[in-house]
Amino acid sequence: MSERILKESRVPYNTVLEQPPQSGEVTFLERNGQAIAAVVSMDEFAAFQQWRAEEANRQRRQSEAEAIEREHAAFQKMLPELLLQYPGRVVAIHQGRVIAVGDNRMDVWQEARQQVDRAPVYVQTVESSPRIYKLPSRKVIRDVAV
Amino acid sequence: MWQYNQAEEPPAPFIDLFLRHPEQPEQRIPITAKIDTGADISALPEQAIAQLNLPITGKLLVQGYEGRSQEVTTYAVHIEITSARFRVYEAVATHEPHALLGRDILNYFYLRLNGPELTLDTSVRPL
């Protein structure tokens, strides 16, 4: 990593480097002795942008998974009441409240997602003993790692 | 018409399909899927779920190979087979490199398995 001190230009964001930065090389721009920006190669910048997008995506997935866990817990808590109101039907839960009811899981999910601008929505069928789906594969997994 | 996958022993019926994010249909990835008439619900490779950022819909109890039930996360996905655009389905995740198409999707199709010639036909109309 190299450090280069460039004089502040009259047009502050228009500087000329003698040579384009090499991969791994960082040129710092300073103002009054304080680093205010860093210049890297385009390859480095592209890698950074990709990392930043992946990190934002990872955080979004983590946040979504946590929200679904909360809605799942809310559903379990509300189940005795839901069994009286909506037996056998599908409910969509968002922020601990029922926001849509229907008979097809994905129809209810889609309707609810539109209501909340695609925020996390949990759908579940209201039944005292949850149905068990058979999937005779050794490789079914609980969830996709975030 | 598709050929059976002969890397499986015995050879097994597979088809090609496309997965899409249910709310961002411009994102589409191709994938192979094994026909699994013994499955109540379909499963998708975890890489495909992550790549498309498929939204979580909830949880289901799934009984697997050993007969043991476990609570698994479900994801919404748009599945396109033989250019027949499908509605949004719910699927679980698998470590398999291919999808498993269960009866939740297969029952919308006519299927013809030709074992001796190791071919498979699918159609939305009678074959």
Image: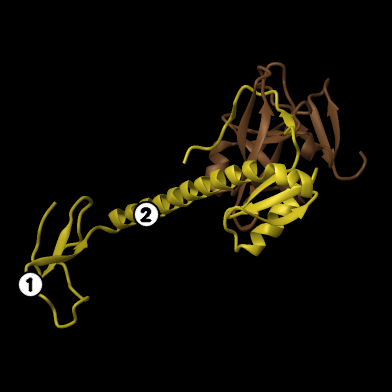
Chain colours: A yellow, B brown
Structural crowding at the residue carrying mark 2, measured as other residues with C-alpha within 10 Å and reported as few (<14), some (14–19) or many (≥20): few
Residue at 63% over, 41% down: A76
Measured in 3D between alpha carbons, the distance from the residue under mark 1 to the one under mark 2, in whole angstroms, is 29 Å
Q: Quadrant of residue A128?
A: top right
Of A92 and B57, which appears nearest the observer? A92
User: In this figure, which residue is indicated by the disc labeled 1?
Assistant: A32
Nearer-N-terminus badge (1/2): 1
Residue at 10% over, 69% down: A6
- Which residue type does callout 1 highlight? Asn
Of A29 and A19, which appears nearest the observer? A29
Residue at 78% over, 46% down: A84
Task: Determine whether, in the image, residue B63 is placed left or right of residue A22.
Answer: right
Disc 2: which chain? A
Dot 1: what SS?
loop
Task: Determine whether, in the image, residue A41 is placed left or right of residue B45.
Answer: left
Q: Position of residue B88 (x, y in %)?
A: 72, 50
Structural crowding at the residue carrying mark 1, measured as other residues with C-alpha within 10 Å and reported as few (<14), some (14–19) or many (≥20): few
Report whether residue B80 is seen: no
- Which residue type does callout 2 highlight? Arg
Of A23 and A50, which appears nearest the observer? A50
**Above/below status of B22 relative to A35:** above
Report whether residue A100 is seen: yes
User: In this figure, which residue is indicated by the disc labeled 2?
Assistant: A52
Disc 1: which chain? A
Q: Position of residue A40 (x, y in %)?
A: 23, 58
